[in-house]
Image: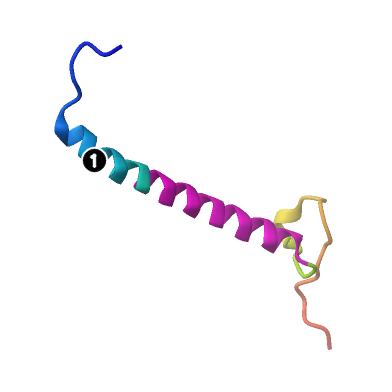
Amino acid sequence: MSLRKEHEIHERRKSLNIGVGVMLGAFVLLVMVLTFTKITSAGFSIPASKASGVGEQLSTEGSD
C-alpha cells in the first residue's frame, strides 16, 4: 500500500524502463550464448602461456 498516488510521469516511463531492462537482458543472454558456443567449439584451446597445466599445451615455435 503506497502512501501517495504514483505520479503520471512514473506511469508513462514504466513501459520504457521495462523495454530497456528487456533489451539489457537480451544483450547479456547474447554474450553468454556466444561465449558458450566459442568455448564448446572443437577448435578452442587455451594458449600455453596462460594454461598453467590445464588444457592442451601448444608449441609457439615454428617447425622447419
Q: Quadrant of the C terminus?
A: bottom right
Foreground pick, 32 / 1: 1
When the figure is inspected, residue 18 is found, relative to residue 51, above or below; the finding is above
Foreground pick, 27 / 48: 27
Residue numbers of the magenta segment: 20-41
The dominant secondary structure in magenta is: helix
Q: Which residue is mark 1?
A: 13
When the figure is inspected, residue 25 is found, relative to residue 50, above or below; the finding is above
Where residue 9 appears, x then y in whole percent? Answer: 16, 35
Which amino acid type is shown beneath numbered disc 1?
A: Arg
Q: Is residue 37 magenta?
A: yes
When the figure is inspected, residue 31 is found, relative to residue 19, above or below; the finding is below
Location of residue 37 by image quarter: bottom right
Where residue 11 appears, x then y in whole percent? Answer: 23, 34
Residue under the image location 26 percent in, 13 percent down: 2
Q: Residue furthest left?
A: 8
Where residue 59 appears, x then y in whole percent? Answer: 80, 70
Foreground pick, 24 / 40: 24
Does residue 7 appear left or right of residue 64 in this picture? left
When the figure is inspected, residue 30 is found, relative to residue 22, above or below; the finding is below
Residue under the image location 29 percent in, 45 percent down: 16
Does residue 23 appear left or right of residue 47 in this picture? left
Q: Is residue 19 magenta?
A: no
Neighbour class for label 1 at 10 Å: few (<14), some, many (≥20)? few
